[in-house]
Image (tube, rainbow, N blue to C red):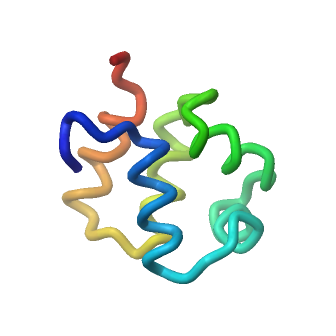
Amino acid sequence: MNSFVTFGRWLKAQRRANDLTQNELARRAYCAEITIRKIEADALRPSRELAELLARALEVEAAEASELARQARRRD
């Protein structure tokens, strides 16, 4: 993930690349659809656990998922 791209923007791009709706991604990550909307709008930073669930739902490799979880919690 590029350091200039927020986790929310990355999530939205990955969700679309995987042809998933916000609802489907939320279902796969065991969270509410509104949570996905807020993260994609950069209005909410996901917990480390949720970031890892989202990465798994998007089938991101384990090594990259850990870095993504760290980036999700980083303050810009």
Q: Position of residue 11 (x, y in %)?
A: 47, 55
Please tell me which residue is depicted at 31% across the width and 35% down the height of the picture.
71
Q: Is residue 44 left or right of residue 53?
A: right
Whether 63 is drawn above or below 37: the answer is below
The one nearer the camera, 19 or 60, is 19
Q: Is residue 18 left or right of residue 74?
A: right
The one nearer the camera, 19 or 25, is 19
Snapshot quadrant of residue 76: top left
Whether 48 is drawn above or below 68: the answer is above
Instruction: Confirm whether residue 56 shows in the render.
Output: yes
Q: Position of residue 12 (x, y in %)?
A: 51, 57
Q: Position of residue 58 (x, y in %)?
A: 46, 71
Please tell me which residue is depicted at 39% across the width and 52% down the height of the picture.
10
Snapshot quadrant of residue 64: bottom left
Please tell me which residue is depicted at 33% across the width and 69% down the height of the picture.
60
Q: Position of residue 8 (x, y in %)?
A: 49, 43
Instruction: Confirm whether residue 57 shows in the render.
Output: no
Whether 4 is drawn above or below 59: the answer is above
